[in-house]
Image (cartoon, coloured by chain):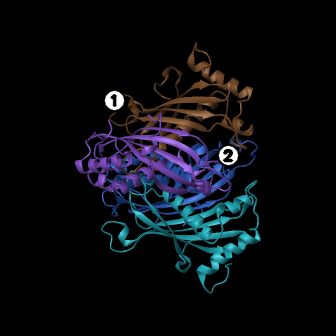
Chain colours: A purple, B blue, C cyan, D brown
Amino acid sequence: LHTEIDRARLREVARVRVLVADTDTTGIVYHASYLRYLELARVELIRAAGLPYRVLEAAGLALPLTDIAVRYRAPAKHDDFMTIEAGLVLLTRVRVAFQYVVAIAPGDRHGLDARLELLTAETRHACVRLADGRPERLPAPVYELLESCYRNAGGVRGAGP
Amino acid sequence: LHTEIDRARLREVARVRVLVADTDTTGIVYHASYLRYLELARVELIRAAGLPYRVLEAAGLALPLTDIAVRYRAPAKHDDFMTIEAGLVLLTRVRVAFQYVVAIAPGDRHGLDARLELLTAETRHACVRLADGRPERLPAPVYELLESCYRNAGGVRGAGP
Amino acid sequence: LHTEIDRARLREVARVRVLVADTDTTGIVYHASYLRYLELARVELIRAAGLPYRVLEAAGLALPLTDIAVRYRAPAKHDDFMTIEAGLVLLTRVRVAFQYVVAIAPGDRHGLDARLELLTAETRHACVRLADGRPERLPAPVYELLESCYRNAGGVRGAGP
Amino acid sequence: LHTEIDRARLREVARVRVLVADTDTTGIVYHASYLRYLELARVELIRAAGLPYRVLEAAGLALPLTDIAVRYRAPAKHDDFMTIEAGLVLLTRVRVAFQYVVAIAPGDRHGLDARLELLTAETRHACVRLADGRPERLPAPVYELLESCYRNAGGVRGAGP
């Protein structure tokens, strides 16, 4: 998990401002606060692929996390304006994985003259039934939308393992 | 709502340590973090009255907040050890209200030589059906447990408006 | 506090999508999740008035909450798209207060054919020094920016009590 | 990171009840909610070793996360009572790592007749100065308390890489 970020698959999907709510007493963003932003990023990524998350819910399905790995590279502070990139990096009939880079662009923090990467991360998800949490195959229309998302990002590569 | 705390109805229900997760960049506990502690307090108050919250859920009911009012009186900091008092202050067939005091006892913060009140609060709740959010009367056994909780705290008073 | 919302002072300041992170097991947005959105709203309101919050911090000041009151009127759900209105409703040399309405516009939830108000709220804040939490007067340039924000919203009224 | 949990190093350090605040609309605990519990666990682990976290802060130091890896194995639900085990698994003059298991004991969920592991996790931390976030060596007294914590858990092994 997450030994290497597949940057060719990432695209910018969200820009968010750090709130006081996200910070902690050491003066930086609390590590768990970023997980909310990763959710925002993957939801917007698949929405852009034509798949609002509520379509999954309406089908009685969910994509709960099975694994997460995050490397924290530099701290963010209150009022920083962050850019979040995300990409689908694995797609099978029953599992998906996303990778993420959260960064601050040069113009988005006073005095910052080069892009600053805050963290890289990967999340893995299983498709399950909402009713009982049992594994379920992705419905064909959902799989096809995700496959299109995977293909568009990755150019010539196939649909993953 | 919350013009006056009915202290005779309050009892100590929980003691919690402030985590970094609860704090913000100004060095104190973030105001919204306390709402989690108020939930803990009212859940433990009614559990002590013989009513685990899951009994309500099993009956297909919930007690969502309709109103909250909080007065923040003094800040708490990381690693403070807080005492939470809670009491049922209103009980009807369709509504309940709780009041709360969060404080630090003298021995629980280095250098503190008198009890420090951090906040006072009140929450009001309606009984609704989980399935559709429609109002519902409290089932008789639930009402009776809450009434006992109300009576035990309040001495000679009746069961409220 | 919050007996009446001064709607003439409110303007739309943010639109946000509900994440799974904001919801709870009863299927609706957890009551405390909204407090993060209220922070976002007041920060964007004063930024629009020319006052990024970091200017306050750079001056060694903060505006911690002293009071909050929220009335929850209707539940929001995952993937709802919410509109947040905020306004400055009180301004003195040492205190400010904001009011808020969170709503869903007709086009922003499937099947919704009229604007749905989710909650109304008010927050009160004191100006304090970050270093020791002691009360402090708002610096004149900050006060003037807030006064301009207050006046522009309120038309003919004065600058508050 | 986290390929294998060093169970001999873990000890039970906390028991916590799942609040509605921790859950999400899919009916289970939201994945990020567990990170708060992991903080609680490592803080209580080192407090039991004689090192309250505020001693670090008073020395102008912090131990921010550099990496986290979590494997989610089974979902928890509202009102579950969870047991958290934690252990120090790596200790150098500038870095520490902890591992964790969160589980439900048979008596702590209705109908559960065997221990249910919810997740395993590892966090890595660097020692930094609070003032500027620069790396710093652990002060000798702090290192010695952590070394004692490491040794007591691990029996005959040395103090790590």
Q: Which residue is mark 1?
A: D113
Q: Chain of mark 2?
A: B
Nearer to us: label 2 or label 1? 1
Left or right of residue B98: residue A43? left
* The N terminus of chain B, quarter of image: bottom right
Chain on which label 1 sits: D
Amino acid type shown at disc 2: Ala
Seen in the image, is B9 located left or right of residue B134? Answer: right
Camera-side residue of A43 and A148: A148
Residue B72 visible in the shown view: yes
Q: Residues within 10 Å of mark 2 (few under 14, many from 20)?
A: some
Tell me, yes or no, whether dots 2 and 1 are on the same chain: no
Q: Nearer the viewer, residue B49 or A87?
A: A87
- Cα–Cα gap, marks 2 and 1: 40 Å
Q: Position of residue C152 (x, y in %)?
A: 61, 80
Q: Position of residue C118 (x, y in %)?
A: 43, 67
What is the three-letter code of the residue carrying label 1? Answer: Asp
* In contact (CB < 8 Å): disc 2 and disc 1: no
Which numbered dot is residue B105? 2
Residue located at (32% from left, 57% from top): A50
Quarter of image, res B110: top right
